Image: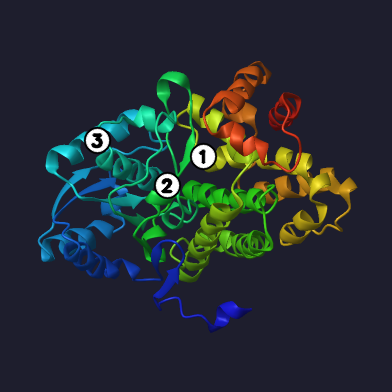
Amino acid sequence: MFEFDINVNEINEILCKSHVYFGCGAIKKIDDIALALKSKGIDKVIVISGKGSYKITGAWDYVEAALKNHNIGYVNYAKCTPNPTTTSIDEAKNLGMEFGAKAVIGIGGGSAIDTAKSVAILLENSDKTADELYEFKFTPKSAVPIVAINLTHGTGTEANRFAVATVVSKDYKPAIAYDCIYPLYSIDDPNLTCKLSPNQTKYVSIDAVNHVVEAATSKVASPYTVTLAKETIKLVVKYLPLALKEPDNKEARYYLMYASMLAGICFDNGLLHYTHALEHPLSAVKHDLPHGLGLSILLPAVIKNIYPSKPYILSDILEPIIKLNGNPNEATKASEGVYEWLNSVGVPERLRDVGFSNYDIEKLTNLAFNTPSLSGLLAIAPTEATREAVEEIYLNSI
């Protein structure tokens, strides 16, 4: 029970590839970050955000004050939506170009920060478009500096090199991963997550669980990713019910945000496979489907598929959810146990509940294999990701 020895109001520095300021009150570190940016000759930035959360949470008050304090000009692109599109990325890039932005600050969840990462690449590669970036028409080697201010506890993008966007014209939702988009600085302040709605609280936390289930069982998993997965799931299972019951509970938000950051680092190392490769087509087709909800729907069927190939790892990391013996024949029990846990935290939905049917399976399967980058995720799944296997996961999720 190491948690009892931790002061949630102490701001720790987590040195992964990104420099993360973590802890309640960490948003105050934006002044130090602004000073560091100014010392690098950065006097203009573009701020990427959603329409309101950056203000509602109070984050913007600190950011604006810091930028003004250090004479850094800014322009704000405040049009990010869940499941960001390449169209919006190009809009933000053009705004940044016109302003002469030399760095990007993303304030929000995965959508805003992933948009910020994408804009950072395009500001450095101004002759390219977001469609070209997400259809892998070029390989970026550099990006302008990125500052990520995280307002959720699920994405992990503040601590890794991944970003996601939807190419609407093709129903593609690819993922990119480049070293040049590790944020230079990130802020993880649990105080900024207390206004998340109950559904957002659930969905982002379940996203973190999916990150580690995949990263701990992929073909490039390691003892490190398994260790991170164990801790992540333990913390989410313990603190998600508390955050739902007491939204302003700092301790619950602290450990959910810590779990999310661990999960981001975990899949930065172990990568992802089935659940993300199969969810991206869902939210590419239905743009209003929350990413975490799509993952939640698919997770039990994915567990059923992969459990026989990784019974010891899965029985170990899923121990806070269901007691298993590491027997390959427990796949159905493991799958049902995960579904029961999801139901217990208020996420019982199946694909039919969000508008999909058996008739959609062929299209979704085609997108899973044809969307740029997703076949690469399927290739590192612990079982052979045949069309039949993918179709069965979708079918078992209906």
At x 47% / y 48%, what residue is drawn? 200
Q: Which mark is residue 315?
A: none
**Position of 320 relative to 99 (above/below):** below
Q: Earlier in the sequence, mark 3 or mark 1?
A: 3
- Which of the labelled discs sits on residue 126, or is there none? 3
Residue at label 1? 291
In the figure, is residue 236 to the left or right of 388?
left
Q: Find residue 30 and report its horizontal and vertical position in percent.
A: 26, 65
Neighbour tally class for label 1: few under 14, some 14-19, many 20 plus, Cα within 10 Å? many
Dot placed on the residue nearer the N-terminal end, 3 or 2: 2
Question: Helix, strand or loop at disc 3?
Answer: loop
- Asked if the residue under mark 2 is in contact with the one under mark 1, i.e. CB atoms within 8 Å, the reply is yes
Quadrant location of residue 279? top right
Q: In which quadrant of the rendered image does the N terminus lie? A: bottom right
Name which residue type carries label 3: Ser
The crowding category of the residue bearing disc 3, from other C-alpha atoms within 10 Å (few below 14, some 14 to 19, many at least 20), is few
